Image (spheres, grey):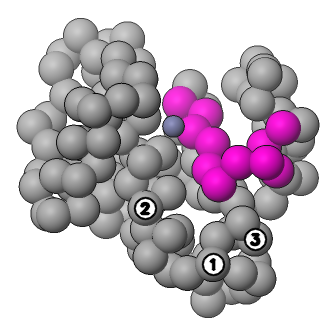
Amino acid sequence: MKNRPVIIDYTQERLEHYSRMASLSFTPTLITRTREVLAMPQKFTRGRRTSAYKYHGVCYSRAKTIFINIRLHYSRKSIDTTVVHEIVHIRYPYLSHGEPFEKRIEAMQKGKVSKPPKHKYVEKWGI
Ligand SMILES: [Zn+2]
């Protein structure tokens, strides 16, 4: 899809929605252009800087920032799926890809609100 304001607004709305569903204390910053990735401090983007264009989405947890690569998406539904995927990375930083991770995505898409993150994760990850 073309990276137009109306699609950026839609993506931002999904990001706010899933941030609430994930019981995060903040909505991550949305970026949709690789130049915005390059403008971030390198300490946050190490290893996922010049490669970001290849991915549907990238989560920069320590910067509380999510990159959504709108051009690689072909529908609003697929943007929704990428947004919830990246939000699950932020909410459950100890989960890597796999079945438990997919279950969290599914639950959130079905409308299940996550418990507030445990204090130790709030302390460690600032979520
Ligand atoms: Zn992922």
Determine whether 53 is above or below 40 in the image.
below
Q: Badge 2 local density, few (<14 within 10 Å), some, or many (20+)?
A: some
Q: Are marks 1 and 2 in contact (CB under 8 Å)?
A: no
Which of the numbered marks, if any, corresponds to residue 102? none
Q: Give the Cα distance between marks 3 and 2.
A: 15 Å
Determine whether 10 is above or below 50 in the image.
below
Q: Give the Cα distance between marks 1 and 3.
A: 8 Å
In this rendering, which labeled residue sits more in front, label 1 or label 3? Answer: 1
Q: Relative to 103, is 95 on the left or the right?
A: right
Q: Badge 1 local density, few (<14 within 10 Å), some, or many (20+)?
A: few
Residue 103, image x, y percentages:
22, 42
Q: Relative to 48, is 21 on the left or the right?
A: left
Residue type at tag 1: Tyr
Which residue is identified by label 1?
Answer: 74
Which of the numbered marks, if any, corresponds to residue 81? 2
Q: Nearer the viewer, residue 59 or 51?
A: 51
Q: Badge 3 local density, few (<14 within 10 Å), some, or many (20+)?
A: some
Residue depicted at x 35% and y 17% = 94
Residue 56 seen in render: yes
Residue that sits furthest to the bottom in the current view: 6
Q: Are marks 1 and 3 in contact (CB under 8 Å)?
A: no
Residue depicted at x 24% and y 10% = 120
Residue depicted at x 72% and y 66% = 72
Secondary structure of the residue carrying tag 1 is: loop
Which residue is identified by label 3?
Answer: 71
Residue type at tag 2: Thr
Q: Which of the two discs, 1 and 2, labels the residue nearer the N terminus?
A: 1
Residue that sits furthest to the front in the current view: 99
Residue type at tag 3: Arg
Q: Tell me the magenta residue range.
A: 51-61
